[in-house]
Image: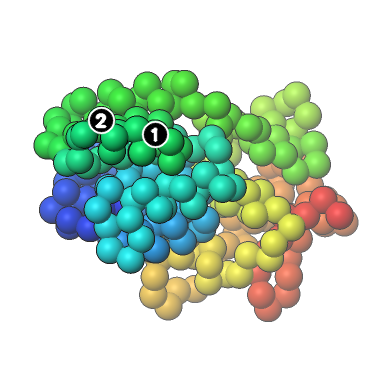
Amino acid sequence: MKILIVEDEAGISNFLKQGLEEEGYIVFVAADGLTGLETVKKETPDLILLDWMLPKLTGLEVCEAIRTYDKKTPILFLTAKDTVQETIDGLRAGANDYIKKPFSFEELLERIKIHFRNDTKTDVLTLGTISINPLSHQVFVGDKEVMLTQKEYDLLKYLVERKGTVCTRNSIIEDVWDIHFEYDTGVIDVFINAIRKKLNLSKDVELLKTIRGVGYIANEN
């Protein structure tokens, strides 16, 4: 599961990132509201931890902007603001929860777990007869489960989440492998071929199509 932390105090965000990654979550960090909003659109996190007082855009503005197109992803405000009116403003903007600073990591962790249990964002991703359950990390072709490695799963999910959009080799290496320097992107071919083989996709089936010199696209057309 992916969590985005939007927090301008590096000490807090680094502490939360380390703790959450130790719990097995994939964590992204943004230090201002504008970057946070851009990261939401790029990474599609499963839960957002949002500070109220942020540079460029306030947490309230970020929350309101997200809710114009995403009604489901849980948003938890982390803030020292605790008046009744401020709490009401946050909830009206679309927040799901409100945790006052300072807070214990254990309490935050339990609240995150509760929201994941109650989260209605459990839509199965589909590509033709292929289906992906993001919560259980299961992949099916029809009613038959297909066992993928973690990186194969991450790559397939990445492409299907962006169905209909060409994903460049550089973006795949950066986002799936988390490599942000010059690297041989030929490794992607190896994983794509392995995925195709496990999903029993013949070369004439273009659900996972190679765009020569550019990258790949998950496409049902």
| Residue 177 in sight here | no
Residue receiving disc 1: 91
Q: Is residue 125 above or below residue 63?
A: above
- The reply, left or right, for residue 201 in relation to residue 159 is right
Which label is found at residue 84?
A: 2
Most extreme residue toward the front is: 85
Mark 1 / mark 2, whichever is N-terminal: 2
State whether residue 201 is above or below residue 131: below
Assign the N terminus to one quadrant of the image: top left
**Please, what secondary structure does the residue beneath circle 1 have?**
helix
Instruction: Give the image location of residue 60, x and y in percent.
Output: 36, 48
The reply, left or right, for residue 75 in relation to residue 119 is left
Q: Residue at x 58, y 51 (%)?
A: 158
Of discs 1 and 2, which sits in the foreground? Answer: 2
The relative height of residue 35 versus residue 103 in the rendered view (above or below) is below
Residue drawn at x 22%, y 50% is 13
Asked whether 129 or 61 is in front, the reply is: 61
Q: CA distance from mark 1 to mark 2?
A: 11 Å
How many other residues sit within 10 Å of disc 1, few (<14), some (14-19) or many (≥20)?
some
What is the secondary structure assignment of the residue under circle 2? helix
- Occupied quadrant, residue 122: top right
Is 133 drawn above or below residue 171 in the view shown?
above
Q: Quadrant of residue 94?
A: top left
